[in-house]
Amino acid sequence: MAYVLGIDLGTSSLKGLLVDETGTVVAQSSADYDVVHAQPGYSEQDPNDWLKACDSVLNELAEKVTDFTSELEGISFSGQMHSLVLLDEHQEVLRPAILWNDTRTTAQCRRIEEVLGDRLLGITRNLALEGFTLPKILWVQENEADIWARARQILLPKDYLSFYLTGDYHTDFSDAAGTLLLDIEKKTWSQEVAEAFQIPLDYLPKVVSASDCIGTIKPDLVDRFGFKKEVKVFAGGADNACAAVGAGILSSDIGMASIGTSGVFLSYEGQGNPDYQGKLHFFNHALEGTCYSMGVTLAAGHSLDWYRKTFATEQGFPELLAPIAAIPAGSEGLLFTPYLVGERTPHVDSKVRGSFIGIDAIHTKAHFTRAVLEGITFSLKDSQRLMQEVAGKRFKRIVSVGGGAKNKDWLQMQADIFNVEVVTLTAEQGPGLGAAMLAAYGAGWFETIQDCALQFVSYTDVVSPLPERVAAYEEAYARYREIYPATKGI
């Protein structure tokens, strides 16, 4: 049976997901690598570690699956967004990649705002934030002029991996949209932005659709790994875009709530063009001709992890969360804001910090635990509310993924707070499945990506909102929204 391979190049590891024509995951493999924090706020990685990890994954899959090398038809990618890879004229890496979670570029963000003003939002549809690629390029220009003088190619992580496999430079629209260099509407690199910061356009790779074939595996790698037939390589997409594809977020009435270390509330925008004025991220999607929006909670699962490590080190998560079922919706007036490391949506504020509000003598540890989960979910509802108010969205279903999908009480809480039915994935495979689906569609296995989703994606039972809890949460959420303006000055 024919296979496609989805490769997810994450921050801490590279994962390979081998999938057959029925959508069955035949085998998985992963390889870890390090993140280097040389100074406070710095986060870097050696791109060559990604190549070693890729080699390891391909070799392990060949060992696990006897016909892997003879039946593999296509490879595609999901990649961590925004991270900067610089190559010289000899196609050699010039310095470690500056990652998406590197925060050294505040001064460069202010410079971008001063130079471009309102034009930045008009062109890129996003604010200048430290995570994006353009501020990292400016930092190198200003602090490592000798490195910049030798640079000839700018790539994103997954695109360095595809270059390794094919020998050609490409990126896709969903990843390019996270650089602050793409004109989102025109779907071209912005000459205005590039010229404003002395970035030659020929340093940037060709932009294609995520499911486009960008070449085949190079002959020397074919020989090394023993592939028996031509293996096509497809461009792939940004990690959040691929996660959305892998969760079946392919229509505007289905949203995704993803709770990992950070939290994401994501919506398919199709060909719509709502103006969120930078309060939500707005990117081109991995589906050709479409876009998606998303809000980000910087400390979602991180808030729960911090809470457990600080107040319940002796308990695992199942034991810690077990008592919350006995606590009423709204935690009897106790509220938590998950701003432990600042916040992104809807408050672009790196200095605000978290709080418990409304502490009463009746509150127990179980109240505090439930309030933490409610606060995380309220922060994601902020994004849902923006989408409803600005774009007129009316969600009929939310797909919950990550940590929030692993506890039945938290799933019910999400349904009640979002006031929408919530489902989880039968087998949650993350962005790697989305990458595999892009390869399957690109290889011609399906006429549309929606047809692919019908075969590859399935859901568990529906969790429906309970009217009495919906009412309680509407009142609690209204009070939650008053906390930020009331505490910002403090």
Image (cartoon, rainbow, N blue to C red):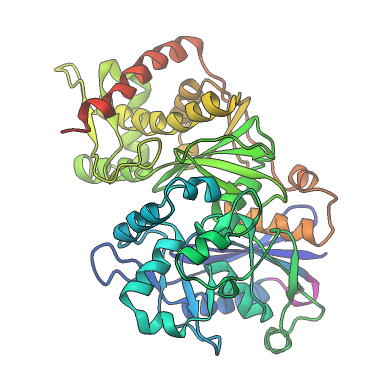
Q: In this image, 253 relative to 368: left or right?
A: right
* Vertical arrangement, residue 346 with respect to residue 138, above or below: above
Magenta region includes residue 400: no
Residue for point 41% across, 52% down: 128
Q: Give the percent coordinates (x, y) of residue 84.
A: 46, 69
Residue for point 56% across, 75% down: 203
Camera-side residue of 20 and 195: 195
Quadrant in which residue 169 is drawn: bottom right
Quadrant in which residue 205 is drawn: bottom right
Q: Give the percent coordinates (x, y) of residue 274.
A: 59, 34
Camera-side residue of 194 and 10: 194
Residue for point 29% across, 44% down: 342
Q: Give the percent coordinates (x, y) of residue 29.
A: 58, 67
* Vertical arrangement, residue 295 with respect to residue 223, above or below: above
Q: In this image, 237 relative to 257: left or right?
A: right
Camera-side residue of 150 and 174: 150
* Quadrant, the N terminus: bottom right
* Residue 35 in view of the camera: no
Residue range corresponding to the magenta coloring:
65-72
